[in-house]
Amino acid sequence: MCGIIGLRLKNPELRPILGQLAVPMVDVLASRGPDSTGVAIYRHDVPPGAMKYSLSAPADDYDWDGYLTALQAAAGASAGAAAGASAGASAGAAGRAAGGVSAELRRKGRDAVLVTSLGPERVPGLLAETDPAVRLFGYGAAIEVYKDVGPAAEVCARYGVAGMAGYQAIGHTRMATESAVTTEHSHPFAVAADLALVHNGSFSNYASVRRDLADQGVRFDTDNDSEVAARYVAREMDAGADLADALRGVLKAFDGFFTLLVTTERSFAVVRDSFACKPMVVAETPDYIAVASEYVALADLPGVEKAKVFEPMPEEIYTWQE
């Protein structure tokens, strides 16, 4: 048993208080998942072309200043080597490449969000080179991921989630059934640019799906069944599917009892298995779309008494997009 919440704000006037709205939703579902808690917050607050990388520190007193210095040095050295290997590259060009790496670290609790124009084809390798103990939990133009072991109130307070602005949030409280209780095994699983997945339930055939994906070159960070679903969705979307089509693929490829909430930068989607035994409630108003495992998580949202409230039907895919 786990708890899921999601909130997509249609009314821009509510965006400054996204965190204030989302945290009580997650907290009220703490009894459904006391082992760990995670949230993904979406907001556009970086320059055009920049990306955000959500990094988790190996210790509370981690030296983020030293990490940023080492990361910039590694990025500069990599750029300089590439420039030096190019035909006609001069020493001056390499120096400018080395000195031109722009990066900022935004501290959140013990963790940090790296903001840089460097793309995902380079950054994971640079992170591993700088310090492999620092974990990457998500990346994209809008997404930030914060997750940790512990109950919802403690985790959200640790990272200041209530003070975060944005236009979209998803959250999860986990009761571990398929894998270990660690930060890495916590939800959301954000395995591609601005893509995040939270899951209530279990997949009975995830091991075979995982083997098929691994044979196709897909890499996994944990043995969690939910990560397999996230990697499957990412693979389908990378091949050209939209989010709804990717979730149709999930319904065909995965067996088990499950409710999924999956988000991208511009999409928000819910799907339940054919038995729909894992609960989900949706509330929609002119100001927002909100979903939760129990209605109690929606009860304090503004204007919810006038919302269209319903339970998603089995094997139906519900999507909302900009």
Image (cartoon, rainbow, N blue to C red):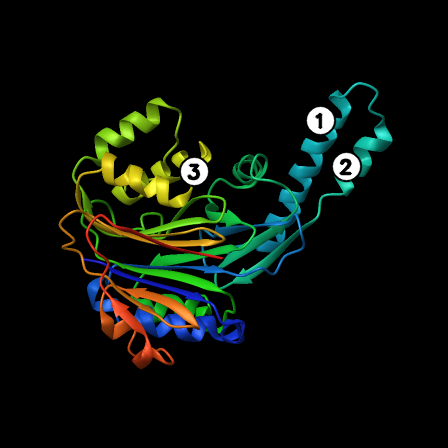
Instruction: Residue 24: give x, y in percent of width and height.
Output: 34, 74
Dots 2, 1 in contact, CB < 8 A:
yes
Q: Nearer the viewer, residue 310 or 118?
A: 310
Which residue position holds label 1? 82
Q: Which residue is mark 2?
A: 97
* Residue 68 sits above or below residue 151 on the image: above
Please state the horizontal and vertical placement of residue 149, each as a whole percent of the image: 32, 58
Front disc: 2 or 3? 3
Residue 223 seen in the figure: no
Residue at 86% across, 32% down: 92
Q: Earlier in the sequence, mark 2 or mark 1?
A: 1
Task: Identify the image quadrant of residue 230.
Answer: top left
Residue 158 lies, in percent from the top left, at 42, 67
Residue at the spot of label 3: 237
Q: Is residue 14 above or below residue 139?
A: below
Q: Amino acid at mark 2?
A: Ala
SS for dot 3:
helix
Pointer 1: residues within 10 angstroms few (<14), some, or many (20+)? few
What is the CA distance from the residue labelled 1 to the residue labelled 3?
Answer: 31 Å
Task: Mark yes or no: residue 261 visible.
Answer: yes
Gap in Å between the C-alphas at discs 2 and 3?
33 Å
Q: Amino acid at mark 1?
A: Ala
Q: Amino acid at mark 3?
A: Met
* Residue 247: image location, x then y, percent: 32, 43
First of labels 2, 3 by sequence position: 2
